[in-house]
Image: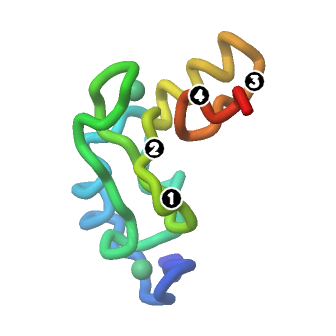
Amino acid sequence: MQPCTNCQTAIDEYLLDKRLEPLRELTVDDFNVCADCVTIVTDACVECDGAVYVPRSKSVTPEFCPACRSDLIDRTGQDPGWTRGQAST
Ligand SMILES: [Zn+2]
Ligand SMILES: [Zn+2]
């Protein structure tokens, strides 16, 4: 078992898997934090109305779910980040 990078407890993959259920494409293997430390916001993606994953270091809720973000990277060749419009500064 891997320890959570945030709180150092062993990651319970079953619990984490439950938390990640609304997310498309991501699995417990994509995370190194425990279920208590992962933040999921449902219906927040502006592209697909799916659930988004909020990185620990971010204080804002992302506007793209991980699946749509990688779709955008595939389509444009650029990483849009987690929110739209922030590139236009
Ligand atoms: Zn944790
Ligand atoms: Zn999406």
- The amino acid pointed to by label 1 is Pro
Question: Along the horizontal axis of the image, is 40 left or right of 75?
Answer: left
Instruction: Identify the residue position indicated by label 1 in the image.
Output: 55
Question: Along the horizontal axis of the image, is 85 left or right of 10?
Answer: right
- At 67% across and 22% down in the image, what residue appears? 73
Residue 6: x %, y % from top left: 52, 81
Whichever of callouts 3 and 4 sits on the residue coming sooner in the sequence is: 3
Residue 8 against residue 60 in the figure, above or below: below
- Dividing the picture into quarters, in which one does residue 38 lie? bottom left
Instruction: Identify the residue position indicated by label 2 in the image.
Output: 62
Whichever of callouts 4 and 2 sits on the residue coming sooner in the sequence is: 2
Number of other residues with Cα within 10 Å of mark 2, as a class: few under 14, some 14 to 19, many 20 or more: many
Instruction: Identify the residue position indicated by label 4 in the image.
Output: 85
Element at label 3: loop
* Label 4, label 2: how far apart the Cα atoms are: 12 Å
Whichever of callouts 1 and 3 sits on the residue coming sooner in the sequence is: 1
- At 35% across and 61% down in the image, what residue appears? 39
- At 49% across and 25% down in the image, what residue appears? 68
Number of other residues with Cα within 10 Å of mark 1, as a class: few under 14, some 14 to 19, many 20 or more: some
Mark 4 close to ligand 2, CB under 8 Å? no
* Label 2, label 1: how far apart the Cα atoms are: 8 Å
Which circle marks residue 78 in the picture? 3
Q: Nearer the viewer, mark 2 or mark 1?
A: 2
Residue furthest top in the image: 75
Q: Nearer the viewer, mark 3 or mark 4?
A: 4
Whichever of callouts 3 and 2 sits on the residue coming sooner in the sequence is: 2
Element at label 2: loop
Residue 65: x %, y % from top left: 43, 35
